Structure formats: structure tokens, C-alpha cells
Amino acid sequence: MIFHNPAGAPELACEQCGCRWFDRINDTCYECGTKVSDESIAEFNLAVERFRARETARADAPGAPVDPAAR
Ligand SMILES: [Zn+2]
């Protein structure tokens, strides 16, 4: 299950309880211990890739975070 936070960034969530905290070592949910499927992880990684590409594409848009060092 994949959620998107208010910033539009994808967040992986447990299929069983909706919890977003995972044991990254074992790929299991902290709340209920459900194993995160490889499909979910692959889907999440894709969503992250798409999100980053989108963020890069609109880096010049108004409202985008500006790196002070770039000025
Ligand atoms: Zn869970």
C-alpha cells in the first residue's frame, strides 16, 4: 500500500494495518510484523523515482524550495 504525504512524496504503508513504520532490515511492519511484499517495495521505489523526477522538473517553479547556497 502506498500513501502520498501532503508534499506528494510517496510513503510505503503496511497492507494489513496501514502503519508506515517498517523494519528496513527485515522488511516487516513494526506494528503487526507483516512482511512487506517485494511487489510493494518495487512499486514504492518506482513511486519514489517518479516523485524525484517530478521534483527535479519543477525545481524552477514558484514555491519550490530554493537552496540558499545557489543564490
Ligand atoms: Zn502492519
Image (cartoon, rainbow, N blue to C red):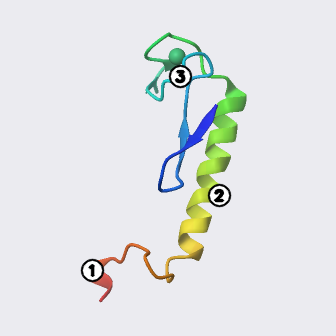
State how far apart marks 2 and 1 are (Cα).
25 Å
- Image marks 2 and 1: residues in contact by CB distance under 8 Å: no
Helix, strand or loop for disc 2: helix
State how far apart marks 3 and 2 are (Cα).
22 Å
Residue at 69% over, 39% down = 43
**N-term mark: 3 or 2:** 3
**N-term mark: 3 or 1:** 3
Disc 2 marks which amino acid?
Arg
Disc 3 marks which amino acid?
Asp
Residue at 47% over, 29% down = 20
What mark, if any, has residue 54 been given in the picture? none
Please state, as top left, top right, bottom left or bottom right, where the N terminus lies in the image: top right
Tell me how many marks there are. 3
In front of the other: label 3 or label 2? 2
Q: Nearer the viewer, residue 20 or 44?
A: 20
The residue where tag 1 is placed is 68
- Image marks 3 and 1: residues in contact by CB distance under 8 Å: no
Relative image position of residue 54 (x, y in whole percent): 61, 67
Left or right for 11, reference 41:
left
Give the quadrant of residue 15: top right
State how far apart marks 3 and 1 are (Cα).
37 Å
Left or right for 61, reference 49:
left
Extreme-bottom residue of the structure? 71
Left or right for 25, reference 15:
left
The residue where tag 2 is placed is 50
